Image: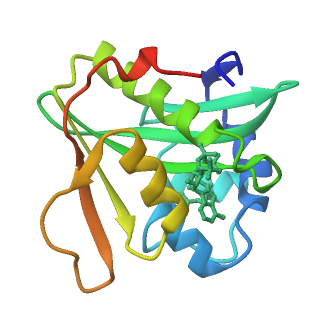
């Protein structure tokens, strides 16, 4: 999975990605609260600030198969956001590959502190983030969202299988 092509996301990528999300609950678990439902590519691109935030895809035959963003939270502090893998490509290591590349990207932007938020019942995501070195940071909020932070960078970008 180390060689899956990677590129900045395009507005048109969000049209297939919108189809990976089948329910409002799945949309919230992926992208957070407050987004429109039903949704579509142009709406999503606008609501998740695809043009403003560093946004990336893993691609196969030019089509997105995974997507994620970096949110700048403060000086040298980046937040991993909206990580998603196409349902047809899950459990193949793409989530890990995507996150490692996002972390490399954050490091190249001189990040020293990386955080993310995840629902406590999102087992696949929590397993993935723990494997990458994220640990729980503080209390779960009333919606069931657990903040996590990366313990340390430790060559995360050199561990692709
Ligand atoms: C979370 C997500 C990105 C993981 O992507 P992925 O490509 O399947 O992840 P990987 O293959 O790199 O690793 C997944 C690991 O998590 C666990 N996992 C993955 N899918 C799982 C499932 N359905 N049930 C239980 N554990 C699962 C396993 O540990 C798995 O490793 P294994 O297959 O070797 O056992 C993907 O499930 C997804 O897109 N979910 C919907 C969007 C979302 O919830 N994003 C996270 C927002 S915080």
Residue 105 placement: quadrant: top left
Residue 138, percent across and down?
A: 12, 65
Taking the spot 16% from the left edge, 26% from the top edge, the residue there is 112
- Residue with the most extreme right position: 61
| Image position of 77 with respect to 62: above or below | below
**Does any portion of residue 45 appear in the rendered image?**
no
Residue 71 placement: quadrant: top left
- Closest to the observer: 123 or 20? 123
Taking the spot 58% from the left edge, 70% from the top edge, the residue there is 27
Residue 149, percent across and down?
A: 22, 47
- Residue with the most extreme bottom position: 142
Left or right of 38: which side holds 83?
Answer: left
Left or right of 116: which side holds 2?
Answer: right
Taking the spot 68% from the left edge, 78% from the top edge, the residue there is 23
| Image position of 125 with respect to 51: above or below | below
Left or right of 53: which side holds 37?
Answer: right
How was the colour assigned to the protein in this rendering?
Answer: rainbow
Residue 35, percent across and down?
A: 51, 70
| Quadrant where the N terminus is found in the figure | top right
**Does any portion of residue 51 appear in the rendered image?**
yes
Split into quadrants, the picture shows ligand 1 in the one at bottom right
Taking the spot 21% from the left edge, 17% from the top edge, the residue there is 110
| Quadrant where the C terminus is found in the figure | top right
Residue 121, percent across and down?
A: 45, 76
| Image position of 68 with respect to 147: above or below | above
């Amino acid at each position: 999975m180390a060689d899956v092509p990677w590129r900045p996301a395009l507005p048109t990528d969000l049209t297939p990605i919108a189809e990976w999300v089948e329910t409002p609950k799945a949309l919230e678990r992926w992208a957070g609260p407050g987004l429109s439902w039903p949704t579509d590519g142009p709406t999503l691109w606008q609501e998740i600030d695809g043009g403003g935030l560093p946004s990336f895809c893993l691609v196969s035959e030019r089509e997105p198969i995974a997507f994620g963003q970096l949110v700048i939270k403060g000086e040298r502090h980046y937040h991993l956001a909206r990580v998603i893998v196409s349902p047809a490509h899950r459990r193949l290591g793409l989530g890990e590959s995507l996150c490692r590349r996002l972390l490399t990207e954050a490091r190249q932007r001189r990040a020293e502190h990386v955080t993310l938020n995840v629902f406590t019942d999102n087992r696949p995501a929590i397993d993935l983030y723990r494997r990458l070195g994220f640990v729980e940071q503080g209390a779960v909020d009333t919606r069931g969202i657990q903040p996590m932070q990366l313990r340390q960078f430790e060559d995360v970008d050199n561990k692709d299988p």
